[in-house]
Amino acid sequence: GAVVSQHPSWVICKSGTSVKIECRSLDFQATTMFWYRQFPKQSLMLMATSNEGSKATYEQGVEKDKFLINHASLTLSTLTVTSAHPEDSSFYICSARDKPSTDTQYFGPGTRLTVL
Amino acid sequence: RKEVEQDPGPFNVPEGATVAFNCTYSNSASQSFFWYRQDCRKEPKLLMSVYSSGNEDGRFTAQLNRASQYISLLIRDSKLSDSATYLCVVGAPPGRRALTFGSGTRLQVQP
């Protein structure tokens, strides 16, 4: 149980285009989903916390107008990288929490974004 | 100062060796602690939660020292398949924010 999927697993796009990444909890309902970014040889950095039906909470330094997050249902959250630039190239990972009373998170397989 | 600090390694050990990793955290209000494993270009996978009383799962033993704010992971009888990056992860008080990840300790088990 507690499987999280992400789509696409990798994407290559041109600078200036927008890319949407989907995160789904397959066998549980996730009231909270998290979006992380990981640059090579660095740790996962939290970008935003997404609660179903409400606006996402962004971490300091993360532009909410550039990284649009939508959490319209208990099983789906999307991250849209708008007007992508080469410096946005990274490994984007989502996670979901199945119980609000626990910190245990289940991670999606990640999306590798390369912006040319 | 980083919220969660780990020695990046790499730790190169022979098969069968016992290896230990330590991690320190800065937020004394942290209430949950985990070790995750991350393979190259893959997502992190939960290895084990860490409790004050210490806990063991097969060849893996985790310890938490709240007074000193450090967490340890001991791996006995290392296998080649244990080669990975081990992430120390700390959760703040519930409802405050998500998990904070250390930058990871890389382990390479050699035949």
Image (cartoon, helix red, strand yellow):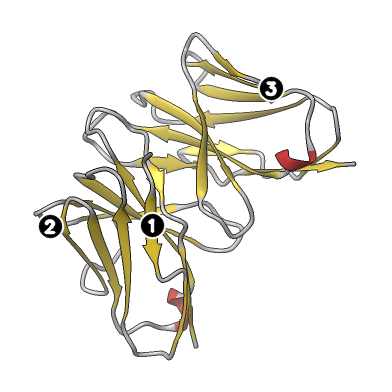
Q: Could you tell whether A30 is left or right of B70 in the image?
A: left
Amino acid of disc 2:
Lys
In this rendering, the answer to whether A26 lies above or below B71 is below
Image quadrant where residue B55 sits:
top right
Amino acid of disc 1:
Ser
In this rendering, the answer to whether A107 lies above or below B99 is below
Both marks 1 and 2 on one chain: yes
**Residue located farthest toward the left when viewing the structure as drawn:** A53
Alpha carbons under labels 1 and 2: distance apart: 22 Å
Q: Could you tell whether A52 is left or right of A58 in the image?
A: left
Image quadrant where residue A67 sits:
bottom left
Residue at image point 39% right, 29% down: B27
Image disc number at residue A5: 1
For numbered disc 1, what is the local secondary structure?
strand
- What x and y, as percent, mark residue A81? 31, 75
Q: Which residue is mark 2?
A: A55
Amino acid of disc 3:
Arg
Q: Which residue is mark 3?
A: B59
Residue A57 visible: yes
- What x and y, as percent, mark residue B64? 52, 17
